[in-house]
Amino acid sequence: MGAGRPVQPGGGIPAVMTDVFVVSGCPCMLGATPSPCARVQWVSGNYDPLINGVPTLTMTSVGLCLSAAGAPQGPVIMARVC
């Protein structure tokens, strides 16, 4: 994530809507079968600035967690990891 990006607001490398993230802490179940979140589909991002034409992500960006089968699991809760 973030390789080769020229913009570094606040000294960090910005995340964009096309980045791939680790999803953790998603205990969703479909009946008695575990159905953990496998990916994030971003619904909204920050259009100022765009990086290589892609919106950046902030703590107010909206995303949906999806299972491996594509079933919606709920909203993304972003956490800052240092």
Image (cartoon, rainbow, N blue to C red):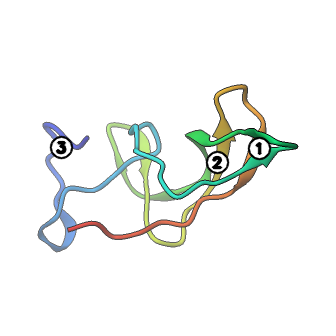
Amino acid carrying label 2: it is Cys
Q: Residue at x 18, y 43 (%)?
A: 5
User: Residue 72 bears which disc, if any?
Assistant: 1
SS at circle 1: strand
Q: Which residue is mark 2?
A: 65
Q: Which residue is mark 3?
A: 5
Judge the density around disc 3: few (<14), some (14-19), many (≥20) Cα neighbours within 10 Å.
Answer: few
Answer with mark 1 or mark 2, whichever residue precedes in sequence.
2
Q: Nearer the viewer, residue 20 or 2?
A: 20
Left or right: 6 in relation to 61: left
Position of 2 relative to 11 (above/below): above
Decide: marks 1, 2 in contact (CB < 8 A)?
Answer: yes
Cα–Cα span, label 3 and label 2: 26 Å
Position of 79 relative to 20 (above/below): below
Q: Residue at x 19, y 56 (%)?
A: 13
Amino acid carrying label 3: it is Arg
Frontmost of labels 3 and 2 is 2
